[in-house]
Each structure stands twice: as C-alpha cells, then as structure tokens.
Amino acid sequence: MSGEEREGIMPKVPSWEIELWSYVSSGDGTYCPLCNRCQKRERDGWCPDENKEDINRFLDERECNFHSYDSIRSEAEGICRLGQLVEMLAQKYLKTAEVCCPPVSTRLVTLFDQHHRIEVRRLPLRVYHGAIWRHKDSWVIQVKDSDVSATQRFTIFHEAFHILAHSRTNPVFRKRGSIVGSFNELLADGFASCILMPRQWVKEKWTEIKDLDGMAEIFAVPKSAMCIRLKWLGLI
C-alpha cells in the first residue's frame, strides 16, 4: 500500500488522540502523568501503573492460573482516562481496516505510518521479545524468532504502538536496566491487548466458550494476556 493510499483512508488526527500523545510525551514516561488526579484511582484505589511490575511478570508467564492473577482488578469502577484513550486508538485502527472478528491480522500494522513502510523481521533476539528500528524510509519491527506465534503477535502490536508514538510525538520508552519509560511500555501492552482482544468480542466469545485455552486460541494470543484481559473486563 502506497503512502498516498494510506493517507487517503486515514482521517486527520482527532483531539482525543492528540491528548493521548501529549501524555505519552510528558516527562520521562516512568509514571502515569494523571496519577495525582485519576478518578478511577480515587474510586477504587487500584492503579495499573502501581501494579505494572506484576502485569509484566504475568505477561511473561507461559502457564496461567486464574487465582495467581487476583491482583488484577476489574474495571467495574470505571476505566482510567489513559486506558480509555488507548482503547479508542485500537478501535480506530480496527474500524479503519474493517476488521470485525478474531483473530486480528498483523498486516494491520502497515496502516500505522502513512508515509513509511513497516516490515516485520523474526530474529534470534536474546534480551527482549521485540524492538523497533527506523531504517532509511522504513520501520522494522524485530520479534524474537523462538517465541511462539501468539507471543510474536502480541509483541508486534506492542512495538507497533511505539511506531505510532514516534510518528506523532517524542516519547520515552524503557531501555534495558532502567525504569525510565516503563509506564509508556505499559500503555503499549494495553494497546496490544485492546487491538487483539477488543472488549465486545471478548465478552461475546466468553459467553460461548468459558474456557481460557479456547479463548486464547480463538484470538491467537498468549494465555497470560487473555487471562489479564478477562480479569480486567470482570469476566473471571
């Protein structure tokens, strides 16, 4: 798809997305910029930012037990503003590509930069599951070749959020051995979850399936990511 074709199907950046990127670019990306005025935090006392280390650990687990994820609270008391904005971003691209059922194709990431080609390469990475590089007029998403397909898919959309951020603003993402940018990494995980597991699809399928393995297979995502999503949506 050419740059002209991409530009023709993508609308102008809406105000809510400008708001999102302003938060992503604020400070060093280590903490939620709204933590001192978050209504959700005031209502139920639970904040994804304060639990991001647990969330990261859960995402890396290969085997899941519902009870081990009890520290993940549901959104019953409402979704935080940044979570809402990230979900709106995911919905924007699903709607643009007219995706209406799982699993979401990773080809969707080609829409994430209207002016530069985006390529996915599977490489023997040692430290991270994925990374992005800007090479001349293209973006390269690197994913760990030894990861299973479901993990690679989650990584691709996580890294694609970084591309979106870099195309819109000057974000700070986490570097090895540092907590700087760790909150923005949490947002990237949230985006991958929302675009691969849209809430309405998950709710509808859960009423039919009621099985973690089956849900993870239908959406082609890691069981750990599906378990967190089900917990967050208050379905388990």
Image (cartoon, rainbow, N blue to C red):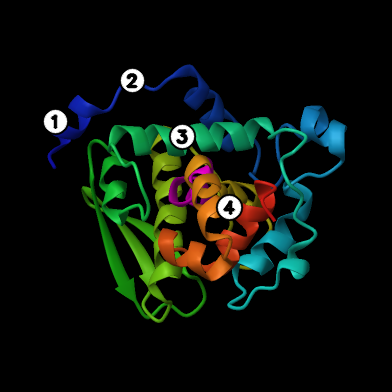
- In depth, the one of 130 and 150 nearer the eye is 150
Distance from disc 1 to disc 2, alpha carbons, whole Å, reads 14 Å
Question: Residue 128: percent from the left, percent from the top?
Answer: 50, 71
Residue 54 against residue 64 in the figure, above or below: above
Residue 9 against residue 2 in the figure, above or below: above
Q: Are marks 2 and 4 in contact (CB under 8 Å)?
A: no
Decide: few, some or many residues near mark 1? Use Cα within 10 Å; few <14, some 14-19, many ≥20: few
- The range drawn in magenta is 192-199
Q: Are marks 3 and 1 in contact (CB under 8 Å)?
A: no
Q: Which residue is mark 4?
A: 185
Residue 214 appears anywhere in the view: yes
Mark sitting on residue 74: none
Give the mark nearest the N terminus, 1 or 2: 1
| Left or right of residue 37, residue 79 in this image | left
Q: Are marks 4 and 3 in contact (CB under 8 Å)?
A: no
| Left or right of residue 178, residue 90 in this image | left
Distance from disc 3 to disc 2, alpha carbons, whole Å, reads 13 Å
Distance from disc 2 to disc 4, alpha carbons, whole Å, reads 25 Å
Q: Which residue is mark 1?
A: 4
Distance from disc 3 to disc 1, alpha carbons, whole Å, reads 22 Å
Give the mark nearest the N terminus, 2 or 4: 2
Question: Residue 198: percent from the left, percent from the top?
Answer: 48, 44
Query: SS of the residue at dot 3?
Result: helix
Query: SS of the residue at dot 4?
Result: helix
Residue 161 against residue 115 in the figure, above or below: below
